[in-house]
Amino acid sequence: MRQIAIVGSGPAGYYTAEAANKKWGDDVRVDVFDALPVPYGLIRSGVAPDHQSIKKVALRYEKTALSSNVRFVGNVSVGDDITVRELQELYDAVILATGAPNDRQLQLEGDQLDNVFGSAEFVGWYNGHPKFADLNPDLSGKHAVVIGMGNVALDVARILAKTSAEMRGSDIVAHAFEALHTSNLETITILGRRGPHQIMMTPKELGELLQLQRAAPSVDHADLPPPADDTNLEPGLRKSVELLRKFADLPEESHAKTAITIDFRFFAGPKAFYGKDGRVTQVECERMNVVDGRPVGTGELFRLPADLVISCIGYRASPLGDVPFDQRAGRFDSVDGRISPGLYCVGWAKRGPTGTIGTNRPDGYNVMELVAEDMTSGSHKRGREGFDELASERGLEIVTFSDWQKIEGAEVAAARSGAPREKFVDIASMIAAKS
Ligand code: NAP
């Protein structure tokens, strides 16, 4: 019998559990740990609430979670309730699928002003992650600035721009739904330090900006390279740049008809934030050139009004005890997912915050090959039984998958009209709902 512990129940965690199941069937026991009492990681608290079709992938993880040899162990924080070393003593393989939950920091003057947030905080707020549910952003101002030109920046801009009617059918949590309903935004500026050919936004997500009821995207023609230069772009990026050209060609009436302009500002590197009475009011930017693909400052500074700033410039994993960690890259130090024999990482904890949900699938299957290489026969580690003993000694309140199903049932029952669920946003309510 092989005993495997997976730390993290997001896509990387459940694809890895699925791979273990496929490889060893009845000869493996897999415990999937999560610090929260609820599973699915970024599917629940990262994927945009209006992208319900993407969230359906959780049904696949549920199938794995319900198989007889896989168990969800919620409400157990590895690092606090039990160390990685202790897990290693109990299990043959420990696989870290902890994602990259922390914001990369801009580290600019003024970034501590009120209403300057990172995307982990802001996305966590509208998705009801218990850590960020109390963020309470002030949405009463006219101007929001979103920093970065990736898909997270697009998610944030779109959620800020949508009307309550457009959010019907989403699982945005009530506190964010209500706050966004009263927002007074007129501009959402998306700041990119490089140019249109360097954006990280994908065409499907970019195209959604053309469907918005009260907002329209805007691009300055002067920022676009000559169309002939698009020919050598890879097809996805070429489609995204075609959309930027469409945004630049939108007639004046499109903007006159809508209350909010989503303004793409290229070649603008954030330099500092300025405020009044402790709250942000302006972002100072430097005009940039792109030289050999890199952003290079020109020294020319300008300021944009900013009542709310959300920096969407990527994420970092959280170090865990003495597990080797690459501080520069913000992820665990591994060779293709092997940290050391018996200890592995997958997903964003291994690769950093890149790729789609599906990218985690090969990670899970590949790491199982490493586990198999390092562990040629079954062992006699105590696994699940040993963990349960330790959990009861420490008085841990484990949340099982069937507990989660009760929590989910209560969330579905509490949903506002048209919504799939109303999430609990604090751990105590989640625990109470399982009883
Ligand atoms: P990302 O795609 O890496 O984009 C990060 C952006 O931040 C880039 O435009 C980058 O510009 C900019 N940036 C980095 N450092 C900066 C700095 N110091 N100053 C100004 N700008 C800076 O990251 P992400 O948007 O967080 O997305 C993470 C992953 O999740 C991606 O793989 C993304 O596709 C995926 N995702 C997918 C979806 C979806 O499919 N619907 C939704 C959300 C997220 P430079 O390029 O100049 O560095």
Image (cartoon, rainbow, N blue to C red):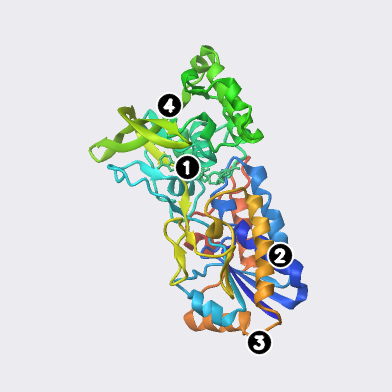
Disc 1 under 8 Å from ligand 1? The reply is no
Closer to the camera, 323 or 168?
A: 323
> What residue occupies the far left of the structure in this picture?
277
Residue where numbered disc 2 is placed: 19
Residue where numbered disc 1 is placed: 176
* Mark whose residue sits in front, 1 or 2: 2
Secondary structure at badge 1 equals: helix
Circle 1/circle 2 CB separation < 8 Å: no
* Labels 3 and 2: the sequence-earlier one: 2
Indicate left or right for 320 with 61 as reference. left
Disc 4 residue crowd, few under 14, some 14–19, many 20+, Cα 10 Å:
many
Q: CA distance from mark 4 to mark 1?
A: 19 Å
Quadrant assignment for the N terminus: bottom right
- Residue 187's disc is 4
Residue 354, percent from left and from top: 56, 49
Q: Residue at x 52, y 67 (%)?
A: 75
* Labels 3 and 4: the sequence-earlier one: 4
Q: CA distance from mark 3 to mark 4?
A: 62 Å
* Mark whose residue sits in front, 3 or 4: 3
Circle 1/circle 3 CB separation < 8 Å: no
> What residue occupies the far bottom of the structure in this picture?
380
Residue where numbered disc 3 is placed: 380
Q: Is residue 81 above or below residue 249?
A: below
Q: Residue at x 57, y 46 (%)?
A: 47
Secondary structure at badge 2 equals: helix
Indicate left or right for 116 with 210 as reference. left
* Labels 1 and 2: the sequence-earlier one: 2
* Labels 1 and 3: the sequence-earlier one: 1
